[in-house]
Amino acid sequence: MLRAGCAPRQTRDFSLCSDGIFEQLRQFRAPRELGKTCESGAVPVPAKATLLLTINWISRSLYCQGPEEGTHTEEALSAVVNSSVELQCSVDDYRFALWLFIPTNNKQPITLSSGDRIFNSEEYALSILEEVNITTYSLEILSVIEDMEGTYSCREQGATKVDITLLVEVPPSVWVEKDGLRVNSRITARIDETFDFSCVALGGRPTVSLSWNINDNHSLSVTHKKFENGTSSTLHYKPSKGDVRLSCITNGQIAAARVKVVLQVNVLCKGRYNTLFTFSSALVKLNDVFFIRL
């Protein structure tokens, strides 16, 4: 399963802005307005308050400012169709968190979860892991389809924590053909002949590129062509002694494994051959010998 999301970080304790700390200040006859103020800097403290409390209040007030704008994480993730993906987000309190899906096809955003509720349990699952000072708020896509491509935004109390752009890949169908007919996995070639083998990749998303190897060496004797919903690459092949295989390989997809089509080659060396055939037929005499030049 693929995983993406923000790493654990040190969190701000927003509970320090609660009435509890202000009750401590009020018992020293602190001004009433301090109970609803959350600003850094020097704080007027009554004479009865100790210097320690003053320093403590200044330190705590720095944590009361909330997340800064523009500090959220942006990521990109590629996933193969029909695979599962887990998207992770670090939040302070999952009760105020949600996952929002923004499709790439300009449709309206969809709220997938809110707090501990998931709104489409057939396609998504929600997991919450609470640890010291951090909570991991994870959304799992159970089986990726093309319509799920877009941005998944994790938000807490209106602030964006992480935006993950999901790209959905579809592996292509790949085969090799000669003169418009598909070629089997094994071929025989004379060393004085030339061949054009076309490798075709159909239906990939995104569209792949193709390359050819002769044995394990990259071949530059190719012609590439793009067409609707696919691409092709033609190898202009002249057999050489020692050739044992031709390979067509896809490139250009991140999550999907590369597709490799291999042709085993049997190369016949150039020369003259006299082959002995023995016939037994009414048209020839028994045990007559014929020499046939190839």
Image: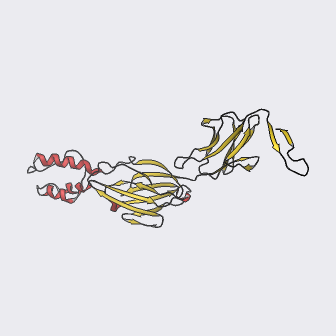
Instruction: Give how far across and how far down residue 227 sits, in percent.
Output: 70, 48
Question: Which residue is more in the foreground, 217 or 21?
Answer: 217
Identified at 87% across, 51% down, the residue is 281
Instruction: Give how far across and how far down residue 185 sits, in percent.
Output: 66, 48
The total of numbered circles placed on residues is 0
Decide if residue 150 is in sight here.
yes
Identified at 42% across, 55% down, the residue is 87
Residue furthest left in the image? 48
Picture quadrant of residue 42: top left
Looking at the image, residue 249 sits to the left or right of residue 17; the answer is: right
Task: Check the picture and name the quadrant holding the N terminus.
Answer: bottom left
Residue furthest front in the image? 286
Looking at the image, residue 249 sits to the left or right of residue 44; the answer is: right
Identified at 47% across, 61% down, the residue is 142
Decide if residue 158 is in sight here.
no
Looking at the image, residue 135 sits to the left or right of residue 204; the answer is: left
Q: On screen, 36 above or below 243?
A: below
Instruction: Give how far across and how far down residue 149 sits, in percent.
Output: 53, 55
Task: Check the picture and name the quadrant holding the C terminus.
Answer: top right
Instruction: Give how far across and how far down residue 272 sits, in percent.
Output: 80, 33
Identified at 33% across, 62% down, the residue is 95
Residue furthest right in the image? 283
Colour scheme shown? secondary structure
Looking at the image, residue 224 sits to the left or right of residue 6; the answer is: right
Q: On screen, 19 above or below 237?
A: below
